[in-house]
Image: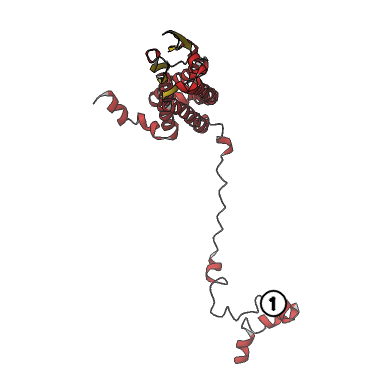
Amino acid sequence: MDVANQLVAQGQFRVLKVPLGFIKILEWLFAIFAFSTCGSYSGMFRMAVECKNRTDSDLSIEVEFEYPFRLHQEYFDAPSCKSGSTERIFLVGDYSSSAEFFVTIGVFAFLYATAALCVYVFFFEKYKENNKGPLIDLGVTGAFAFMWLVSSAAWAKGLSDVKTATDPDKVLTMISACQTDPKRCREVHDPVMSGLNTSVAFGFINLILWLGNLWFVFKETGIIAPFMRAPPPQEKPAAPDAYGQQGAYEQDPYASNQGGYQPDYSQQGYNQDAQYGQGYGQQGAPTSFANQM
């Protein structure tokens, strides 16, 4: 039997079935999705410029851009429609800070989730020892939840700016030939931004996962244990004595007619002495029964 099977047989991986370990696996996966969809992106768009002299026209101007979106370094050559000359046009904007910050948080979250999973599986007893492991885990988890919030919001704003800066209609206005006669210029192909949209979605999913995991890590710290005391045990009713079981408390067929033991003073109008005399004057027999005799 190999090592992995031995660990499974010993129950080392049982922690992955509880919310603490299962959510950590989700954090590990979605961190990969977040930084990979953003960090591996490359896109392009096409434009067409028609000149009066068709030999000067360019109907397939390709503009490529990629992570980390330093667009001010990306350029293309467009015809000026003046004796075959061209002009070099640079895109506008540098959005590398928000993109790189988002990817960095994703990479570090992936590394921490990997380390935490290893601790959960192989060193869970030491993790629980002296409560230091859960407290450290709680602090780091809270910090990553906050960083996911900041980085995802920053990258969502950065992505919006990237879409604006790479809009072919806006880029065409930067070409001098299109400024002279806009009808001769048109967009051919828009950039595909679905991968970047997905990266923003993964960022906010990570925020939800790390926030949700705060509760399960907090439970491991034991801080809440004193506030979750068990309710006090209820007192058991005393057992009746032998006389109570066989004597006065035993069901009596005449119980429905023996009103003399517990008379209703308010309804019958008798005083206390008369009722005692009525109830016990006939040796404990009911009045109605004595009349029948």
Q: Is residue 177 magenta?
A: no
Q: Where residue 116 appears, x then y in whole percent?
A: 43, 23
Q: In the shown orientation, is residue 139 left or right of residue 199? A: right
State which quadrant residue 58 falls in: top left
**Is the stretch drawn in magenta largely helix, strand or loop?**
loop
In the image, what residue type sits under mark 1?
A: Asp
Is residue 55 something one can see in this rendering? yes
Is residue 132 something one can see in this rendering? no
Q: Quadrant of the C terminus?
A: bottom right
Q: Where residue 259 appears, x then y in whole percent?
A: 64, 79
* SS state under label 1: loop
Q: In the shown orientation, is residue 78 left or right of residue 4? A: right
Above or below residue 19? Residue 151 is above
Q: Residue at x 60, y 87 (%)?
A: 289
Q: Where residue 133 appears, x then y in whole percent?
A: 49, 23
Q: Where residue 197 appears, x then y in whole percent?
A: 45, 28
Q: Quadrant of the N terminus?
A: top left
Viewer-nearest residue: 26 or 54: 54
State which quadrant residue 8 falls in: top left
Q: Residue at x 66, y 81 (%)?
A: 279
Viewer-nearest residue: 172 or 7: 172
Disc 1 crowd, CA 10 A, few/some/many (<14, 14-19, 20+): few
Above or below residue 235? Residue 14 is above
**Boundaries of the magenta span:** 249-255
The residue that label 1 is drawn on is 264
